[in-house]
Image: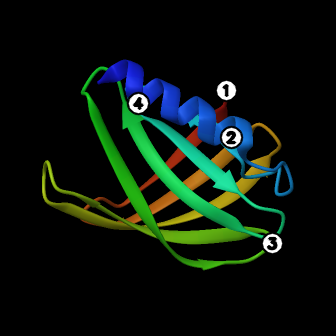
Amino acid sequence: MKKLLITALLLLITFTSKAQEQFEGTWVSKGSTFKTTILASEYSVMEVFNFSFVDNRLIKEKIKSKSKDMFTTTLYNAYNGYSVDITYTMKDKNTLIKHMSGHLNKKIYLKKL
């Protein structure tokens, strides 16, 4: 299962165009086993998902709105029943800020891998 997930992730990342470079990529935060992967086309963010090989889980986010400098998503975690709205903004080219509100109200700084 892990090999299949790794292969699928690498293929998606490899074939994704490099247009919205400020958001695209895999991002990590201190204290979490989850990695956030953002796939973007030439004009917008297309897909956001979080995965953890430690917890063996994949959690997708639904995109609600997007602009050049930010985008918002909704995440539902079936494992714990949490639902949050997330706004992503860039601090700098290697730091993404994830503002979460809902069952969890928190600001998380993500670093690009």
Q: Which of marks 4 and 3 is in front?
A: 4
| Residue at the spot of label 4 | 5
Image point (68%, 60%), residue name: 89
Q: Is residue 73 above or below residue 12?
A: below
Label 2, secondary structure: give it.
strand
For label 3, the SS is: loop
Which label lies toward us, 4 or 1?
Answer: 4
Q: Earlier in the sequence, mark 3 or mark 2?
A: 2
* Apparent side of residue 55 relative to residue 3 in the rendered image (left or right): left
Q: Can residue 78 be seen by looking at this rendering?
A: yes
**Which of the two discs, 1 and 3, labels the residue nearer the N terminus?**
3
Mark 2 and mark 4 in contact? Answer it, CB < 8 Å.
no
**Residue at the disc numbered 2:** 25
The amino acid on which the numbered mark 1 sits, given as a three-letter code, is Leu
Check disc 4 and give the amino acid type. Leu
Q: Do the residues labelled 2 and 1 touch (CB within 8 Å)?
A: yes
Give the percent coordinates (x, y) of residue 76. Answer: 27, 62
Q: Mark 1 points at which residue?
A: 113
Query: Is label 3 or label 2 in front?
Result: 2
**Camera sees residue 32:** no
Outermost residue, left side: 80
**Percent from the top left, x then y, of residue 110?**
59, 39
Q: Return the residue at label 3.
A: 68
Q: Residue 101's image quarter?
A: bottom left
CB-based contact (under 8 Å), mark 1 and mark 3: no
Residue 59 x, y percent position in the rendering:
34, 49
N-term mark: 4 or 3: 4
Determine crowd level at label 2: few under 14, some 14-19, many 20+ residues with C-alpha closer than 10 A: some
Q: Please tell me which of labels 2 and 4 falls first in the chain.
A: 4
